[in-house]
Each structure stands twice: as structure tokens, then as C-alpha cells.
Image (cartoon, coloured by chain):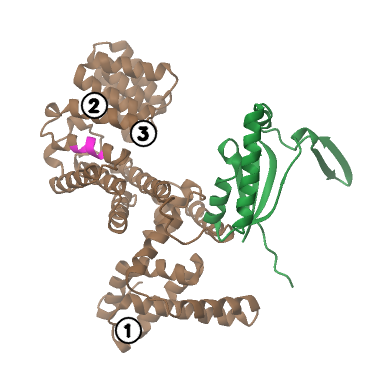
Amino acid sequence: MSADAADPVREMVDAVYRSESRRVLATLIRLLGDFDVAEEALHDAFAAAVEHWPRDGVPANPRAWLVSAGRFKAIDAMRRRARFDATVAKLAREIETHTAEIATDGPGVEDDRLRLIFTCCHPALPPDAQVALTLREVCGLTTEEIAHAFLTTPPTVAQRIVRAKAKIRDARIPYQVPAPADLPDRLDTVLHVVYLVFNEGYSASSGALLVRHDLSGEAIRLGRLLVELLPDPEAIGLLALMVLHESRRAARTSAAGELVLLDEQDRSLWNQGQIAEGTALVERALASRRFGPYTLQAAIAAVHAEAPAAAQTDWAQIVGLYDVLLHADPSPIVELNRAAAIAMRDGPAAGLALIDAILARGDLQEYHHAHSARADLCRRLGKTADARAAYERALTFARQEPERRFLQRRLSELDA
Amino acid sequence: MRYLCLIYDDEKKVGAMPKGESDAFMGAYFAFTEDIKKSGHYLAGEALQPVQTATTVRVRNGKLSTTDGPFAETKEQLGGFYMINARDLNDAIQVASRIPSARMGSIEVRPIMEFDQP
């Protein structure tokens, strides 16, 4: 919508596009039964708005107007094609009769957004396609923006999206919110996609990479939408986790773009508004008594957020939360984090023994955080040679520039 | 819409089942087949003879080659199939998840390609 900014109706169309286009798209997919047809209809509906609204005035319910304009344009386009293809004529008739009575507003329309999310995150689609499709259809990012954010090329992203849409159509993945029996599993997939998007934005936050699209912000918007539409405890827990991590964004990198670890962060830079929001969300999720791993991770983040200084962190409570998390969602990475918390509560030797046990088992061998955590504990125990070997091992596996610079800085500090 | 559910099992594991267990396994298959006949999902279904009875046929440059066994050596072998009629993929996944072999092997769910009749 490249608009003449002076024109108030064009400005209004732009504003409606920003606030309503994803809702309108979600409903059009339901009415028209096809992603590509719905996208074309969405485009045509906004083109019609630009033409009609300056002349006839902005309608009282712009969203309903756009949905029916899009539906009409799609049926019209099918009719024109139907001259060459009889099956299209039949389809056009079916859509026209079956969707004539369907309301374009009301509670069903909010369900359309959930339908869209669950369809984009269907487990029959490959995970990278779930992420790309969700960012494209639910968040409205362009293919270029998604490619930029995931350090890949637009044709790669476009191909993922095209293939995913083809599978939705050809394998007939239904456009629906899962039945209650399937909901927990299906919601897990959705939450995982949101978590992946958030992590990609969070771990990429560095000076050199600031041009990347604000994926963390996009993930938090998705998280809020989910909590609004489906206030499941884990959806609330995930939103809490993201908001609490986001509260430390300004403190995570120095002015020079260097990574700053939690214990060295300037806590006055933490966003207190986000901490208050995140903590309230954690309490709400915990009160449900049906919480899971996301809520527990958020609770750990909340304990950190409550500490006015690193030395005042309640490590006993954090270890306790990791114990529960390890029980709910056992993984070597949770074990590693628990070991780091134990090192803070009981001293570096206790933590080191646990990390060594994880590595001896063969887990996390190529995970740079395991080696850098081990290096850090060796350093604190005065085992300089072991610390150096472990930092060097971490360096062979660390891929992101800020993390590599951090490890090199630690290595050079050992020599000092 | 029609879907083919391809049933992959580890033949060795199935073959090594004690009698009571394999009877129960077969019983579960009979019950499942009855069930999807009643629900209207069932179109066809067969079990296959073990993989050592398989023959792979290829024609290359007009020359027929016949070899023993399936074309790929895998841990799980195609052991049977159901052709079902399902509303959509979610419905098909529901049916496939109730195939007894889903608990030990795996089920590949493939939509049938429909060609338009002229």
C-alpha cells in the first residue's frame, strides 16, 4: 500500500491493512478453502477499498466489508476462469451457496485466526516450513523479511512456503482448531514454533545483526495473540518466558555490541514494566496447576528478575525449579543449566562434577555452552590449564560472532 | 478423500513375539478392521507376506533385471496396507494412529492422487 500520505482515506486504508489484514485473510481462507486464492482475494479486497472508500466513505465495519469484497472478487475470478474449466464453475457455485449465510463478524471470526495458526503449525509440515508459513500468513512478514531474519535466501523461504501450501492442499490438512483430545499435542507444536521464532530473534540480538527483523517482538505478539485466543497455562507460561527474557535485552549487549552475561549485566537497564508483566503471567500460569516446561523456565527467569543484584539471586529456589523442570522435561541441556545453578548454590566443584558426568556420558559434546560453562567453573577453581582447554573446545563449536568474541576475551583474561 | 496407510513393521520383532502376544496382536488387527468398516473409513486392506518373498523388477535400456528382496534395506519393512476414506488428513491420522502396528512400527499416510476423468 504505497499511499499518498496526505490523503486521509488512504491513511485509513493503510491503518486497516495493518490492523485487520491478517484477520481478513484468516476468514477468507476458511471461506475460499485455499491459501493462494485467499491471498489474491485479500489483495483485491484492499484494492477495491482504495477505489471505493474515497468515493463512498469508509464503511462502519471495514473488516466485514473487506471479507465480503474479497469473497465476491474470488467468486468473480473463478467465474471468469470457469469459461475454460467446468470444475471451477462448480467450485465457484459451491463457495457462493455455502458461504452466503456465514457471518463475517462475531465470535467465529476469532476462531479463524486460531484455525490459521494451527494449520500453519500442523505437525505434518516440516518444522522450518511451520515457522516460515506462520511468519508469512499469521504475522504478515514478507518472504524477504523472513529470509533476512533466518539468514537464508528469499527463494529458499518462498519454496518452503509453496511446498507447505501444496501439502496443505494435496494431503487435505483441514482448516480447523484441533479437537479437545488432540489439543495439548497440537498446542505444543504451535508453542514450539513461537519459541523458535523468539530464540532466533533473541540469540541474534547483536550490533552487527541489528538489521534483522525484530523476531522477538513478532514472537511476543504471537504469544499475546495465543493467550488472548486460547489462554492455556503453557501459552501463558511461554509468553511470560519471552517477556522476561525481553526485559533484559538492553543489558545483554554492551555499547560495543559485546555479549554481557547475566551476572555482569547492569540491572538498572532491565525493563521493570516487562518484569512486572512477566512475573504476573508466571503467577497466573502457576496458579492453574496444569503448567509445564515453559512456565517453569519462566519461573526461573522471574527469580533472576527479582534479584536486585547477581549476588542476591535465590539460587536455592532456582535449583528447586530446575529439579521440577528436569522431572517434567528431562534433557541434557536442562541438566547442564541445573549444574550451573548448583555451582552457584554449593560451589564450583559440585557443579563441575555434574557437568563432567554429562560430558562423560557422551551428551552435549558439541554444545559450546557446555564447554564454556565447564571452563568457567575450572577458572573459578584455579584450574587454569583445564579452563583454557575447555574455552578452546567451546570456541571450536561456537558459531555466532559475539559468542566467539566473548570466549576469546575469556581466554585472554586467563593469561592476564 | 482416499488415503493409503502403509504399515511398516520390524519383521524380526513381530516374528519373535511369543504366541500369546502375537495372537493378541492379530486380534487387535481384526478388531481394528471391523471398527473402521463400521465407521465407513475402510476401503481395502491386506497384509503382505514377509519381505524375503519380495522380488524387485527393473527395466533398464529395455533389459529386464529381477533381483531378490525389496529395493532398499531398512530396519522396518512394508508389511501391509489399508486404503481408507477420510474426511481430511486429521481424520486419516486418527485412523492411522489406531492401526496396531503404529505402537511398534510406523504408518506412512499418503493421499491418493486423483486424476480428473475427461
Q: Amino acid at mark 3?
A: Asp
Magenta stretch, main secondary structure, is: helix
Left or right: where B105 falls relative to A181:
right
Q: What element does badge 3 sit on?
A: loop
Quadrant where the C terminus of chain B sits is bottom right
Tell me, what hue is chain B? green
Element type at marker 1?
helix
Hue of chain A?
brown
Disc number lying in front (3 or 1): 3
Instruction: Name the residue at 61% across, 41% down.
Output: B28
Q: Are marks 2 and 3 in contact (CB under 8 Å)?
A: no
Q: Is residue A93 above or below residue B25?
A: below
Pointer 3 residue: A329
State which quarter of the image contains the N terminus of chain B.
bottom right
Q: Which residues are magenta?
A: A298-302
Say which label, 3 or 1, has the lower sequence index.
1
Quarter of the image for residue A412 reads top left
In magenta segment, residue B61: no
Q: Secondary structure at mark 2?
A: helix
Task: Name the mark on residue A62.
Answer: none
Dot label at residue A319: 2
Q: Is residue A64 visible to us here? A: yes
Q: Which residue is mark 1?
A: A53
Upstream in sequence: badge 2 or badge 3: 2
Amino acid type, mark 1: Trp
Image x and y of residue A320, in percent: 23, 28
Q: Do callouts 1 and 2 point to residues on the same chain? A: yes
Quarter of the image holding residue A100?
Answer: bottom left
In the image, residue A364 above or below residue A2: above
Residue A138, given in percent of the width and then of the height, sits at 38, 59
